[in-house]
Amino acid sequence: MRARIAVLGGDGIGPEVAREGAAALRAVAARFGHEFELTEALVGGAAIDATGAPLPPETLALCRASAAILFGAIGGPRWGPAAPVRPEQGLLALRKELGLFANLRPVTVDPRLAHASPLKAELLVGVDLVVVRELTGGIYFGEKRRTETTAFDACTYSVEEVERVVRVAGRLARGRRRKITSVDKANVLETSRLWRAVAERVVRAEFPDCTLEHQLVDSCAMQLVRRPADFDVVVTENMFGDILTDEASVLAGSIGLLPSASLGAGTLGLYEPIHGSAPDIAGQGVADPYGTIMSVAMLLRHSLGLEAEARAVEAAVGAAIGAGVLTPDLGGTARTAEAGAAVAEAVRRSRV
Ligand code: IPM
Ligand code: MG
């Protein structure tokens, strides 16, 4: 297959991990006989420095013309919250412009890495969940206002916005354990009461073969570390999903391991590790590239329909971990490039 893939490294460790993601894509192309045209573009702080805008029009145009986008990370102390133009606006605009409303964040625990988690190993047995985070609505995108003495962020959801993301969760649940947990704050928020009613209706009507449970977000935050293996598919609004997935990454042992896929109505998707730009370790060559490479597997699966190739990448990451190629976040001494090379090599040798 021929496919154009945009590579947006971004800031901090973003370009370092994106480089290894791109290497994995090249290894897949070589091993399976595909032609991937990888094109790099600026986003985030790097784009602000070069052009003044966090999402230059050329970058957006490239993304629209691509089959998929591989994204590193954005942000850093140089473009702090007080700056008039911020890197985060680039990522948010990209999600919104491309209509990527569903963000899939799978969390699994490799037993060989259970030691890297601060949680008791017995709690982590059998953890296999995926958070479906609504990505283009809610408080992230509502009207914002600021005066000398007050600040205002509106949180809105429409029925349609909830329906479509709950459907994504339902379809995912069907390929898994058919258990959906919808997370809201319905005891306080009007948007959450709408969310709960719509989730209830959609699942009952369209996914009667799945079970649906509602959890309040505060309680869910607790259950995620008390009995994480009980979760299958978690569906929630934008900000709750942002917060809960950072928490859930603790289960896996390192936030550096978690991939994500941001999907819309078509096959175009944006794939990024859930971690940030980690300015404290940027430029040192020690960032964990596995979350980005697992995002590449999701890219192959969801945007290109290459399931065997996706599995080969996942197996290659497993093999590298099994061989003890671990970056410092996982208690090892491997460098980013070594970890990436171990995966690329395993992909080239894979016999799927
Ligand atoms: C994430 C990040 C982003 C978000 C930031 C960088 C805007 O935290 O993808 O989880 O809040 O969505
Ligand atoms: Mg986040």
Image: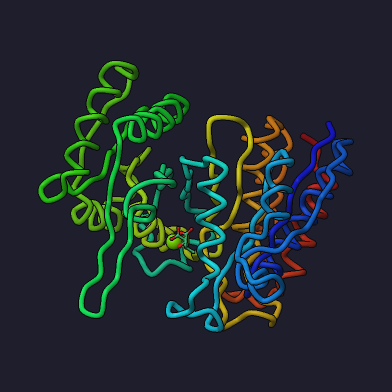
Residue 329 sits above or below residue 293 on the image: below
Split into 4 quadrants, where in the image is the N terminus? top right
Query: Whole-percent x and y of residue 90?
Result: 56, 61
Quarter holding residue 301: top right
Hey, which residue is sitting farthest left in the picture? 187
Query: Whole-percent x and y of residue 348?
Result: 85, 47
For image coordinates 37% across by 38% down, the residue present is 233
Residue 65 in the figure: left or right of residue 272: right
Residue 196 in the figure: left or right of residue 176: left
Residue 39 sits above or below residue 183 on the image: below
Quarter holding residue 173: top left
- Asked if residue 13 can be seen in this view, the reply is no
Q: How many marks?
A: 0
Residue 288 sits above or below residue 60 on the image: below
For image coordinates 53% across by 54% down, the residue present is 93
For image coordinates 67% across by 60% down, the residue present is 56
Residue 14 in the figure: left or right of residue 66: left
For image coordinates 52% across by 72% down, the residue present is 85
Query: Whole-percent x and y of residue 174?
Result: 43, 24
> 145 or 55: nearer the eye?
145
